[in-house]
Image: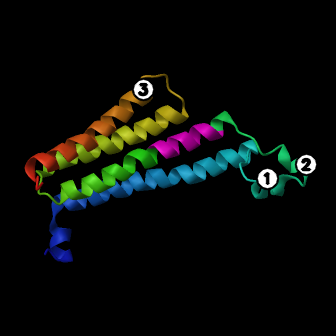
Amino acid sequence: MADLSQLMENEVFMAFASYATIILSKMMFMSPATAFYRLTKKVFSNPEDAAGFGKGENAKKYLRTDESVERVRRAHLNDIENIVPFLGIGLLYSLSGPDLSTALLHFRIFVGARIYHTIAYLTPLPQPNRALSFFVGYGVTLSMAYSLLRNHLYL
């Protein structure tokens, strides 16, 4: 069993940890972005949140949906659907002993694709921008999974 000092000397693991931190920070940014849009548009999904802007029937007018708010929420949900598998598979991949340059390529492409996906979603850029960035990131995760299964298959 490897101890923590050995893990910290593993360049691929440290690269993974760096890019995982970047992409998790980006994903965390989406929560305050949603809150910002909700507050500036005065759009809430819960009565207790709307109560700060009115009482009784007056508060109900703030319980609605808005395309800008929903767009940020969908981008955040898409992050969760794609970043969580990347973190799990990427961790296993980084511990499987891949070549550093290959691993860095995987990590950098994924992070770049997810950042571009968010920009394409929030701007919004015309399709196929968002779809291509989604499939590039998804392909990276599939590539790491394939490498794990091909090189370290114990079924």
Mark 3 surroundings: few (<14), some (14-19) or many (≥20) residues within 10 A: some
Q: Quadrant of residue 70?
A: top right
**Element type at mark 3:** helix
The kind of residue on which mark 2 rests is: Glu
Residue 95 position within the rendered picture, expressed as x and y whole percent measured from the top left: 17, 60
Q: Quadrant of the N terminus?
A: bottom left
**Residue in the picture at 50% in, 45% down:** 77
Mark 1 or mark 3, which is nearer to you?
1
**Labels 1 and 3: the sequence-earlier one:** 1
Query: Which label belongs to residue 57?
Result: 2
Residue 99 position within the rendered picture, expressed as x and y whole percent measured from the top left: 10, 50
**Magenta span of residues:** 69-78
Query: Which label belongs to residue 50?
Result: 1
**Labels 1 and 2: the sequence-earlier one:** 1
Count every numbered label the image shows and give the total: 3
Task: Tell whether position 111 is magenta.
Answer: no
The kind of residue on which mark 3 rests is: Asn
- The Cα atoms of the two marked residues, 3 and 2, are separated by 42 Å
**Residue in the picture at 29% in, 60% down:** 17
Residue sitting at the far front: 155
